Amino acid sequence: MTISGYTYNEFGEKLNAYVSASQPIQSLEHLLGRSSELERIKKSLFAPGRHVFIYGERGVGKSSLAATAANQYQSADSSYIDVSCAPDATLISLIINIAYIATDLSHIKTISTSVSSKLNLRYLTLENNRVEVQSNLNDTVRTLSDAICLLKEVTEIHSERPIVVIDEFDRIHSAEERNRFADLLKQLGDKKIPIKFIFTGVGTSLKELLGSHHSAIRQLETIELSKLSWDARWEILLSAAKAFNISVEYDICVRIAAISDGYPYYVHLITEKLLWRVFEDENKVSEVSKDHFQSALRDAIAGITAELNRPYELAVNRRSIEYEAIIWATADSDYLQSSLVDMYASYKFIMKQLDESPLIYDQFSQQIRNLKKQRFGEILVSDMQRGYYTYREKMLRGYVRLQAEANNVELLGEEAKPTQKEYMKAPAKSSTGYYQSRPPKGVHFGRNRN
Ligand SMILES: Nc1ncnc2c1ncn2[C@@H]1O[C@H](COP(=O)(O)OP(=O)(O)OP(=O)(O)O)[C@@H](O)[C@H]1O
Ligand SMILES: [Mg+2]
């Protein structure tokens, strides 16, 4: 084993304290590149009656930001209340759920008689000096004002400073139910009930999630979460590598950051596979090699869920690598939308790397149009701007980039590689909240490349 001093188990455990491909981040030290958003949340939660709504693409890090912010706000006498939404969830069912979770966590679950005599409870019950949820809440909590009354009781018993995360709000199927949350927030403010909510949802606007005809916007600090900055992307990799005294050259950092397309999941996954490869290398090494990197890409692809894999397989449609190149060309840009002309330029560049002759433009555009069809995985949709395309599921672009890279094709090709080997240093924790969000020097994006 190359990483001396660690047994297999010790290595696995330590590595997974740094990488977290399958779970949201919960703590400040591992949440990278989001300090300005955290600061905004922190400030806005001081305002009585104000809550937070975090929205953005799938997988950009909404739940992680919400969990970290909630951990910061929640008083130490309890844990924050975390509820996830199911398609059939309603406002009432969620609040009942919150009551169950809160009583389980409650710091006064077992209370003294002097405290209990001060509590005037309608929905929660006191039995043998313990706070419990009434067994029949589904019958007794029916209207919005019942729900508010229940939340008031929850606020009293849960903790000094309670906060609730309502995760995946977009999953609530009924628009009517989603809209009711606007009234809830307004009334919580009017009644001065000091419980805070952080919502997360996949979407491009709050209007889409909450409906437009409400004044609740005044009760909400809205945070549109964008892709992770370049600095934060490689800080994930570098902080994990540094923990094992392994160095990573500039080139590999840039490749991983570029592949990820700003979705931290890919950086975590590739880093995890990469460091396992280093750990299992028979030779003693102190630096990640190109071979480790290539193997890690293959391991990452093998470990990726069908949700991302399946549309890609359909798009490739069992065809040869020349056809796969068409799909890679759709992901060769840092812009969310690409025009056919841009994609064709990327395609020709990729075919040059493969030493193959490209299709003519008309054939190429026909193949691109096919990618909008269901039987080709429906990976693209037409953008509002005529002649432009965008990914139906944005996170899939990262998977496409990963496939290209595993086939030794560099999307976002680097024109000017560093002349000498440069090693990246993990940037110091940003105190200003500023992270480099532009691509590093040398990374050249698809547009206008010939
Ligand atoms: N700021 C960050 N720094 C490091 N890793 C992050 C950051 N944000 C998210 N991650 C990682 O990225 C992955 C996706 O994050 P998260 O689950 O929070 O995203 P999400 O937007 O809630 O996704 P979904 O839309 O699928 O619910 C997780 O593995 C998480 O550990
Ligand atoms: Mg989430």
Image (spheres, grey):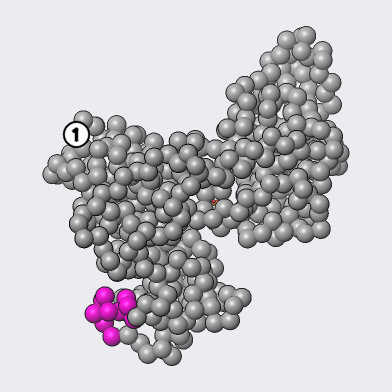
Q: Does residue 246 appear to the left or right of 31 in the view shown?
A: left
Left or right relative to 403: residue 88:
right
Residue located at (49% from left, 36% from top): 28
Q: Is residue 407 visible?
A: no
Q: Is residue 441 above or below residue 7?
A: below
Instruction: Give the crowd class for mark 1: few <14, some 14-19, many >=20 residues within 10 Å.
Output: few
Horizontal placement of 323 versus 389: left or right?
Answer: left
Q: Is residue 447 at least partly visible in the picture?
A: yes
Instruction: Identify residue for label 1.
Output: 4
Q: Residue at x 81, y 43 (%)?
A: 186
The quadrant of the image that shows the C terminus is bottom left
Measured as percent of width and height from the top left, residue 158 is found at 69, 25
Residue 356 within the magenta-colored segment of the rendering: yes
Q: Residue at x 28, y 45 (%)?
A: 275
As rendered, which of 57 and 447 lies closer to the eye? 447
Please identify the quarter of the rendering in which residue 266 is found.
bottom left
User: In the image, is residue 91 above or below residue 296?
Assistant: above
Amino acid type of the residue that numbered disc 1 sits on in the rendered structure: Ser
Secondary structure under the numbered disc 1 in the rendered image: loop
Which segment did they paint magenta? 347-357
Image position, residue 66 (x, y; %)? 58, 42
Name the magenta segment's main secondary structure.
helix
